[in-house]
Image (cartoon, rainbow, N blue to C red):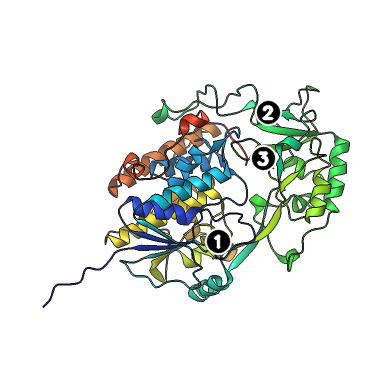
Amino acid sequence: MGPQRKVKKMIRIVGGGLAGSEAAWQAASRGVPVTLYEMRPVRPTAVHRTDRLAELVCSNSFRGDKLDNAVGLLKEEMRRLGSLVMRAAEASRVPAGAALAVDRELFAQTMTDALTSHPLITIVREEVAAIPDSTERDPVIVATGPLTSEALSADLARLVGAEHLYFYDAISPIVLADTIDRSKVFRASRWNRSLTGECNVRLQADRDGPACGVDDGDGDYLNCPMTREEYERFYDALVHAESATVHDFDREKFFEGCLPIEVMAHRGADTLRFGPMKPVGLVDPRTGRPPYAAVQLRQDNLAGDHYSLVGFQTQIKWGDQARVLRLIPGLEQAEFVRFGMVHRNTYVNGPTVLAETWQVRRRPTLFFAGQMSGVEGYVESAASGLLAGLNAVALVHGEPVSAPPRTTAIGALAYYVSHANPAHYEPSNITFGIIEPLVKAPRNKLARKLALSERALTALAAWMMDRSEPPRHALLSREGPSPRVQDVGLEPGLTAVDDPR
């Protein structure tokens, strides 16, 4: 009997967004070769502007970055698991109060450089029109995102045995900084909060972590204050603006966390004042009082020459966008680098399709990850890719697959996607509400959240030890970008101040 042929081990990943890129890094960092398929630029999409991997097409914000909110906890868990997305985000960070926001071009370039330079990652630029065959030695991760091509969507529908669910999503406009009238706006973070200064709210385990929660005197947002008359004029123009043509739009549904401003406006005259235009926590230095309403502008790149309108996703036709948005004080002469637009997000009914390991129930050698798997948000998408990558590696090595416990944020997210009510399923951000509750919870809300986070990080450490996960520094020592923490004046870690975006 001749010698047995050695079976080549490899993981194939379809989709080079946040989830696919994170999955590729996790697998390659653990010594498993990866082939990553990305259809851009061979097949462009309606919203992507470059051919870079992990390009951000909506907001440039990864939302709050502290341990008293769930997404901040999820970020810290990902850091401890050696996340490339978190590393690249730190390297491209821009001022955003207590949130983690990035220069989107630098972020995508940092991700692309890390993946293309890794010796175990091969990037193939072509469209994959059907789900590849998969085996335990050659698992496949599909992470094609909300803009999955029609051909692959049809094959996915055939595989899962049901029609895809879908909703429409909208992205915010971006203005050129030099065209903002600085005499009409003021710089401040809500409640005067930012990531600089001292903060005494920390976990016991993180006594030496970064300080937080005190404004540096300037604030990280430009705020466009409105009087009641200005708001009412803006509101009237908004509700009468012409929407872009969307097939069967009135019967489609938006994700509640990313509603277009005109959809919110039609719910009531004050809806925007309790949403993206809320004046709470802001004081106009010219009047000494909160404005009637306010539009916040967030720096969109390190150069500081682009600002995005926070929470101003829209599907209004571009001509009307310019007319309506120039009614905002300070934006009368604004030049728009990018107008808002609508795109269709496609996702599967997670509870009927996926296990909490992100494996397809009917085909365990196939994984889904990212927004098309039924999560919402940049961080959540990357987290699903991270865990799918870890479990694909386990399959290749003949080891058990697993998910962190529900007491962790990343484990709770996996459990929600695989166990929510399939009859009423819709994508979800991470929240403390889906994390397993404490047996004896503190009455104080902040203390309760910090206790949940402390328990989560302890549980994650135990899970990593059970899996014999390598320490973070071993995963980040491969070829790739170096965290440029000094360049942005911050240290990696978490803060204790909320930011709604």
**Which quarter shows the N terminus?**
bottom left
As drawn, the label of residue 41 is 1
Q: Judge by depth and name the residue closer to the eye, 184 or 229.
A: 184
Q: Judge by depth and name the residue closer to the eye, 469 or 242.
A: 242
Is 327 on the left-hand or right-hand side of 148? right
As drawn, the label of residue 306 is 3
- Amino acid type at mark 3: His
On the question of residue 437 being in view, the answer is: no
Is 21 on the left-hand or right-hand side of 226? left
- Amino acid type at mark 1: Pro
Q: Judge by depth and name the residue closer to the eye, 328 or 431.
A: 328
The earlier-in-sequence mark between 3 and 1 is 1
Q: Which residue is drawn at 76% across and 23% down?
A: 285
Q: Where is residue 444 in the image (x, y as percent from the top left)?
A: 54, 31
Query: In the structure shown, which secondary structural element does the residue marked by tag 2 occupy?
Result: loop
| Measured Cα–Cα span from mark 2 to mark 1 | 39 Å
Taking the view exactly as shown, the residue that stands out farthest to the bottom is 1
Q: Which residue is drawn at 49% across and 55% down?
A: 416
**Which quarter shows the C terminus?**
top right
Discs 2/1, front: 1
Q: Position of residue 392 (x, y in %)?
A: 36, 60
Is 473 on the left-hand or right-hand side of 51? left
Q: Quadrant of residue 120?
A: bottom left
Discs 3/2, front: 3
- Mark 2 nearby-residue class (10 Å; few <14, some 14–19, many ≥20): many
- Amino acid type at mark 2: Ala
Say which residue label 2 marks: 188
